[in-house]
Image: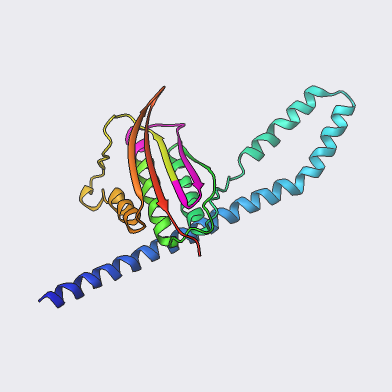
Amino acid sequence: MIATIIQRNQRFYYQYVAELNQHYLNVEIEYFKIYEIAQQETRKVKHDMKNHMYVLKELLEEERYQEAKIYLEPLTHQVDNIKRILTSGNEAVDAILNVKNEKAQKSGNEILIEGTLNPKIQMASIDLCTIFANALDNAIEELERYGAKGEQIEVQILGQNHIQMLIFRNTTFTKEKKRRTKKKDWQYHGFGMNNIKEVVNKYQGDIKVEIEEKETLKYVLEIIIPFTTK
């Protein structure tokens, strides 16, 4: 009986890992689509920019400043519309960041990132992705729940010696630290923080949640992962 239970648990575990790997594979495919669109937009602007500069140079030399200003406005808009690619120093995490940023932007918000992951950190990409995916999903859902627009989900990656710190910060509308999903199929959700905790515990790390009370309330998730280098 014990052997049967162990085999069943192992089967469920491997099925879970397989589904997780497939999910992250799909995310990476979506990321490469986003990346290719961004590259196409950049190449298009770069190709035309030389000609635009000649026109602007001529207008300025002739002191036709108002015409130069009018000519410049749509160019500025064109540059602003180029998709911004978020980078973390890890390709798998980059895929998560950019796909989640697309999701956040659809609801009128965006993800900002500061810092890069230490390339020497000995963490499996799937574990890093689990942290980032769940933390960002929670933040996006929090903002969507209250219909927030124009908000920023801040991601800070800090490191010192053999410590990697990840900080996720977003506006919140309650002082309650524990998040509860409002989705109709609630029984299939709410595992995000538990998944993060499992990964953090796996690497003997630490996790802390706090509510910052400044001009606005901020939900802050801090994760510390110690690591050794080869």
Instruction: Check the image and name the residue furthest to the left.
Output: 1
Question: In screen coordinates, is 186 left or right of 227?
Answer: left
Q: Residue at 42% of width from left, 53% of height from top?
A: 226
In the picture, residue 175 is in which quadrant? top left
| Colour convention | rainbow
Above or below, 225 relative to 148: below
Q: Inspect the magenta stretch and tell me whether residue 161 lies in it.
A: yes
Relative image position of residue 57 (x, y in whole percent): 85, 33
Relative image position of residue 129 (x, y in whole percent): 42, 56
Question: In screen coordinates, is 9 left or right of 99?
Answer: left
Q: Residue at 34% of width from left, 48% of height from top?
A: 206
Q: Quadrant of the N terminus?
A: bottom left
Given residues 211 and 93, the one toward you in this image is 211
Given residues 151 and 89, the one toward you in this image is 89
Relative image position of residue 87 (x, y in whole percent): 55, 50
Question: In screen coordinates, is 203 left or right of 53?
Answer: left
Above or below, 39 relative to 146: below
Q: Residue at 89% of width from left, 28% of height from top?
A: 61
Give, as a single range, the part of the protein colored magenta. 142-165
Total residue callouts: 0
Q: Residue at 70% of width from left, 49% of height from top?
A: 44
Relative image position of residue 62 (x, y in whole percent): 90, 26
Instruction: Check the image and name the residue furthest to the right.
Output: 62
Q: Inspect the magenta stretch and tell me whether residue 102 lies in it.
A: no
